[in-house]
Amino acid sequence: MTDAFTLCHGLPGHLRGEAAVLYWQAFGGKLGRVMGPDAKAHRFLEQVIRDDHAIVALDGAGRLLGLAGFKTMKGSFAGGGWSDMRRIYGVFGMLWRAPLLALLSREIDNDRFLLDGICVASHARGAGIGSALLAAIETEARHRGYGYVRLDVIDTNWRARALYERLGYMAIKTDSIGPLRHVFGFDAAVTMVKPI
């Protein structure tokens, strides 16, 4: 556990690889069957993450403790396109992976600022980093003129949902992913919103 951390806007370029691994540790459970194996997923994420679409938590030595990505009209923290996918997974790998991932993607919301993933290193949990990152996302949203923050959490991630509820986020809808549950390992995504 860590006691001291600093929040920074933007991901320092030298931490892209570390950020890709941390993001994958948080979301690989639901994306692993499509984006795996791990080494390819790490390479893909390191290639596509947008440094300017994140707020990060660093320890006193500048090591990455956590991050919160967000979406704007210019893109998302962990997006990427077909050509990015082809570079890592090849043509065949791109042709079946990209459509499946597109089914999970959420549109840009003109009325609410969108969180694009939040994760905290396992050794740094319990130090308030997740709450601090969410507060920073809310500040970023206000700065950009939004009155709400929106996030999506999968139905099996009850710990994250409990944190969001404790911080004032309210569930407004649940979208089932139907037969895709066999691919991604969860049944539904819950959309949560907080007025700021």
Image (spheres, grey):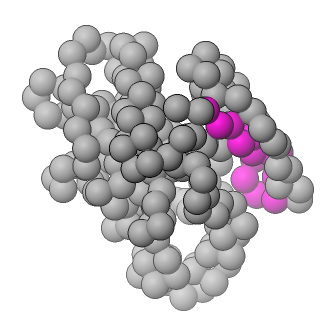
Residue plotted at (29% across, 57% down): 52
**Residue 114 percent across, percent down from the top left:** 54, 49
Residue 188 on the magenta span: yes
Residue plotted at (46% across, 84% down): 83
- Number of numbered discs present? 0
**Residue 31 percent across, percent down from the top left:** 61, 54
Residue 153 on the magenta span: no
Give the answer, above or below, for where 111 lies relative to 138. Answer: below
Relative depth, front residue between 73 and 133? 73
Answer with the quarter of the image where residue 75 lies.
Answer: bottom left
Q: Quadrant of the N terminus?
A: top left
Residue plotted at (72% across, 53% down): 184
Q: Is residue 186 left or right of residue 90?
A: right
Answer with the quarter of the image where residue 46 lies.
Answer: bottom left
Relative depth, front residue between 86 and 12? 12
Q: Is residue 121 left or right of residue 180?
A: left
**What span is in magenta?**
180-194
Q: Is residue 13 left or right of residue 140?
A: left
